[in-house]
Image (cartoon, rainbow, N blue to C red):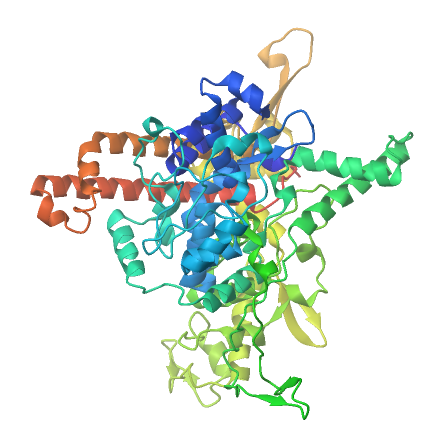
C-alpha cells in the first residue's frame, strides 16, 4: 500500500470536517462513506448510504473536480472510487499555499494559484475568460465546447462572480459517463476574491446550511486572517490593487508557475490511485515483455518487479512533464536594456528578420488554451520544508545567516520535484548526485541575490569582518569596530567573502545545514535534506516527550536510540540512574506508544522477578504515534470552532449580512460588537493553533521517507 494512502480513522474524521467546511454537507456525507468503507463502486455507494442517486452523483462530481477521490474504469462493468487522503488533508493548507507562492512570485501568482485551488483544475482558455470576460469569446466557447467534465449547467458551485459576470465551467479530464446526468456546473473564478464560505453545488438546498469560514482562507497571512482582514482584502481586490491587468500578464504568470513546478497539466493518471497505477504498470510490462503471462522463477519475478517499478516512475514522470506553454509577450529580464521594437524587411518584402537582442512576440496558440492545469501539492511540501529550515536557522544563527540560507534553498527548490520519493528503491537525485550543478551554489551567487539593505556584517565576529574588509579598522575592548565599516559600500567580491562566512556557520552547525563540495578550487555548497529532515523528526518527538514527561523522558529516548534494545539493568547503567526512578517513565512512554517493551520469561512460570523486560525506541512507531495525536488535536480544534460558532450563530449571521459588513459600528450594538470581537479573538487563536499542528504534520510526515530504527 502507498505510504500516503495509509489512513487512520482519526484522519478520516479530520478530512471529513475539512471537506464539510470547504464544500458543504452533501460532499462531506459522500466523502464520509468512502472514509468508512474504502474503495466503492457507484452501486455499492448507493447501498451504503441513505442518499439518493442524484445526491450521490452531485457529491461525486464535486469530489472528482477537487481531486479528493481517485476513480478507475479498469473494470468495464463499473467505475471504482477511492479517497485521495493526501489531497483531502491538503484542504487545511490552501491558504498557506497562497502565502508560499506570494513570498516567491508575488501577489499575482498567488491570486492565480488561489483560484486554481478553489476550482480543482481548469483550462487556460476558461481562466482567461474568467479574468477578462468577453461576450463574443464566451458565446463561441459555449457553441464549440459546451460545458466541461460532461456536466450540464446547473447550480453554481464553489465560486463567486467576477466583475458581475459568471464565467463558464472549467475544462477537465473527462468524468465517468455514469455521472453525466449529475447536471452540475463545477466552479467559477475570482480575480482576487476568496472563495465563498460554503459555495458548493449540493443539489439539495436543505443540506447547504453551513455558513462557516473555509479553513483555506482562514489560514492566510501566516495562518491567520480575521474576517475584518478578509473583508478589507476583498475590497482592495475590487479596487484593482492586486488584479492581473491583461491576458499577457496572466500568461506570464502561468508560464512562471508551470516552469517552477507549482502548476502542472492534468493527466488521466492523476485520477488513478497508487493501487490502480501499479495494476496499469504491471499490465503494460506483462504485455510488452512477457506476452501477457506471469514469468516463472524467482529471478524472473524479481526482474519483473523492477520493471514494474521503473514503469510506474515513467508513468508518474510523464504525467508531471511541463507542458509547452509560452507567453504571447515575454517579459524582458530585469537587467536588460530596452530593445527597439523594429523588424527589418528583406528586399522581396516576404520575410522579416528580428533585430538581434529583440524578443519577438509569440501569439498564444489554441493548443495552449486547451491545456488543463492544477496545483502541484508535492511542490507545497518542498516549500514548507524550505520555510521550516529558514525559521530554524534564524533561531539558531540569526537573521542574516537565515537570509543567506533562504536564497540557497530557493535556488535548490526550483529543481526539487518532491521531498521524498514514495516509489520504493528510487534514489533521490537531489540528495545523491552532488555533481549536478543544479543542486550546488556558491557564495558569489548568494551575494548577488542578497538584498542590499541587509547588513551582512550582522551576526559575525567583528575581528573576522575587519580581517576581510577593513584593513585600517580596529576592534576595541567593547568588541566594536573603529572606524565603523559600511556594509552597503563594499564590493561584490568582499560581500561574497562575508557571505561565505555565514555559509561556513551553517556548515559547522551540529545539524549540518549545508554540505561543502568543491569544483575547480571554488567553494560550492549543497544541502543534504534527508539527514536534516531526520533530525527534524527526532527533535519534534523529543519536544513532545519533554512536554509530557520532562527531561527524564528525553534522556531515556536518547539512550535507547543510541544503545538499542536494553533490559532494565542496562538501561539504568546507560542513564546512570536507579531502576526505580526509570521504571515509571518507561511505563508511561510505553503506554503512550513512544517506546516499545517486550517481556521474555526465564522459566515457564510468568513471575515478575523471573522475567526479562526489554525496552527499545522505534523512531518510525514514535513518528506515527505523534502523527496520530496531532490529527486528533486538529479534529478537536475544528470541533471547538464549530461549537463556538454555534454559540454565536445569530450574531454571526447578522454580522455577515452584506449591508452590515464594513458598517458594523452603525448596525451593531455595543454589546454585539464586544461579542463579535470576542469571537474573532477566539477564532484567531484556534486557527493559529491549527496552523501549528499542521506544521508538526509537515515535519513528521512530509519531509522525509519512512525510517527504520538504527
The relative height of residue 411 versus residue 638 in the rendered view (above or below) is: below
Locate the N terminus by quadrant.
top right
Quadrant position of residue 559? top right
| Residue 395 visible (yes or no) | no
Quadrant position of residue 596? top right
Residue 439: x and y in percent read 65, 63
Viewer-side residue, 333 vs 30: 30
Q: Residue at x 52, y 76 (%)?
A: 447
Q: Residue at x 18, y 44 (%)?
A: 677
Residue at far right of view: 297
Residue 195: x and y in percent read 37, 46
The relative height of residue 467 versus residue 529 in the rendered view (above or below) is: below
Residue 501: x and y in percent read 53, 72
The relative height of residue 183 versus residue 120 in the rendered view (above or below) is: above
Q: Is residue 134 left or right of residue 618?
A: left
Viewer-side residue, 689 vs 115: 115
Viewer-side residue, 513 vs 268: 268
Amino acid at each position: 500500500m502507498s505510504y500516503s494512502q495509509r489512513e487512520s480513522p482519526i484522519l478520516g474524521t479530520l478530512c471529513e470536517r475539512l471537506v464539510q467546511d470547504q464544500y458543504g454537507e452533501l460532499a462531506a456525507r459522500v466523502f464520509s462513506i468512502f472514509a468508512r468503507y474504502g474503495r466503492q463502486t457507484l452501486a455499492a455507494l448507493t447501498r451504503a448510504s441513505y442518499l439518493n442517486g442524484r445526491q450521490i452523483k452531485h457529491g461525486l462530481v464535486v469530489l472528482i473536480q477537487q481531486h479528493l477521490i481517485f476513480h478507475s474504469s479498469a473494470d468495464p462493468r463499473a467505475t471504482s472510487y477511492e479517497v485521495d487522503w493526501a489531497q483531502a488533508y491538503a484542504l487545511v493548507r490552501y491558504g498557506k499555499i497562497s502565502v508560499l507562492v506570494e513570498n516567491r512570485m508575488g501577489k499575482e501568482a498567488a491570486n492565480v494559484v488561489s483560484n486554481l485551488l478553489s476550482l480543482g483544475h481548469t483550462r487556460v482558455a476558461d481562466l482567461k475568460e474568467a479574468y477578462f470576460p468577453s461576450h463574443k469569446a464566451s458565446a463561441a466557447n459555449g457553441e464549440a465546447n459546451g460545458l466541461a467534465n460532461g456536466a450540464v449547467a446547473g447550480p453554481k458551485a464553489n465560486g463567486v462572480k467576477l466583475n458581475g459576470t459568471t464565467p463558464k465551467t472549467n475544462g477537465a479530464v473527462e468524468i465517468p459517463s455514469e455521472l453525466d446526468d449529475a447536471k452540475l456546473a463545477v466552479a467559477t473564478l475570482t480575480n482576487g476574491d476568496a472563495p465563498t464560505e460554503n459555495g458548493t453545488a449540493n443539489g439539495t438546498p436543505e443540506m447547504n446550511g453551513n455558513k462557516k469560514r473555509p479553513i483555506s482562507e482562514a489560514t492566510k497571512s501566516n495562518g491567520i486572517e480575521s474576517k475584518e482582514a478578509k473583508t478589507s482584502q476583498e475590497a482592495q481586490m475590487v479596487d484593482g490593487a492586486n488584479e492581473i491587468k491583461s491576458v499577457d500578464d496572466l500568461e506570464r504568470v502561468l508560464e512562471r508557475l508551470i516552469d517552477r513546478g507549482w502548476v502542472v497539466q492534468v493527466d488521466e493518471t492523476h485520477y488513478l490511485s497508487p493501487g490502480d497505477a501499479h495494476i496499469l504498470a504491471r499490465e503494460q510490462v506483462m504485455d510488452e515483455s512477457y506476452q501477457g503471462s506471469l514469468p516463472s522463477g524467482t529471478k524472473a519475478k524479481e526482474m519483473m518487479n523492477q520493471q514494474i517499478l521503473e514503469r510506474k516512475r515513467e508513468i508518474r514522470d510523464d504525467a508531471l512533464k511541463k507542458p509547452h506553454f509560452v507567453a504571447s509577450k515575454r517579459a524582458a529580464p530585469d537587467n536588460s536594456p530596452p530593445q527597439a521594437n523594429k523588424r527589418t524587411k528583406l528586399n522581396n518584402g516576404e520575410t522579416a528578420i528580428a533585430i538581434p537582442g529583440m524578443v519577438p512576440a509569440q501569439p498564444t496558440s489554441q493548443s495552449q488554451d486547451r491545456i488543463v492545469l492544477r496545483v502541484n501539492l508535492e511542490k507545497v511540501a518542498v516549500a514548507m520544508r524550505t520555510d521550516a529550515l529558514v525559521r530554524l536557522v534564524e533561531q539558531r544563527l540569526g537573521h542574516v545567516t537565515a537570509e543567506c540560507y533562504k536564497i540557497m534553498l530557493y535556488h535548490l527548490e526550483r529543481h526539487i520535484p518532491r521531498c521524498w520519493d514514495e516509489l520504493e528503491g528510487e534514489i533521490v537525485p537531489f540528495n545523491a548526485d552532488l555533481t549536478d550543478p543544479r543542486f550546488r551554489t556558491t557564495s558569489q551567487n548568494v551575494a548577488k541575490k542578497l538584498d542590499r539593505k541587509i547588513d551582512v556584517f550582522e551576526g559575525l565576529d567583528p575581528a573576522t569582518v575587519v580581517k576581510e574588509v577593513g584593513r585600517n579598522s580596529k576592534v576595541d575592548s567593547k568588541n566594536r569596530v573603529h572606524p565603523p565599516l559600511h556594509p552597503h559600500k563594499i564590493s561584490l567580491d568582499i560581500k561574497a567573502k562575508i557571505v561565505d562566512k555565514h555559509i561556513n556557520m551553517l556548515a559547522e552547525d551540529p545539524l549540518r545545514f549545508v554540505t561543502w563540495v568543491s569544483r575547480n578550487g571554488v567553494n560550492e555548497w549543497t544541502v543534504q535534506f534527508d539527514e536534516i529532515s531526520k533530525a527534524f523528526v527526532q527533535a519534534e518527538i523529543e519536544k513532545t516527550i519533554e512536554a509530557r514527561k520532562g527531561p527524564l523522558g528525553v534522556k531515556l529516548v536518547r539512550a535507547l536510540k543510541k544503545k538499542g534494545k536494553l533490559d532494565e539493568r542496562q538501561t539504568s547503567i546507560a542513564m546512570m540512574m536507579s531502576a526505580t526512578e526509570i521504571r515509571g517513565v518507561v511505563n508511561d512512554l510505553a503506554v503512550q506508544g513512544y517506546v516499545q517493551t517486550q517481556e521474555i520469561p526465564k522459566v515457564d512460570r510468568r513471575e515478575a522477578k523471573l522475567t526479562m523486560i526489554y525496552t527499545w525506541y522505534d523512531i518510525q512507531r514514535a513518528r506515527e504515534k505523534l502523527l496520530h495525536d496531532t490529527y486528533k488535536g486538529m479534529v478537536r480544534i475544528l470541533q471547538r470552532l464549530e461549537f463556538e460558532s454555534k454559540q454565536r450563530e445569530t450574531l454571526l449571521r447578522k454580522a455577515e449580512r452584506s449591508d452590515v459588513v464594513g458598517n458594523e459600528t452603525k448596525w451593531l450594538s455595543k454589546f454585539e460588537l464586544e461579542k463579535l470581537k470576542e469571537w474573532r479573538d477566539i477564532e484567531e487563536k484556534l486557527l493559529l493553533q491549527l496552523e501549528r499542528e499542521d506544521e508538526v504534520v509537515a515535519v513528521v510526515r512530509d519531509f522525509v521517507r519512512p525510517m527504520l530504527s538504527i
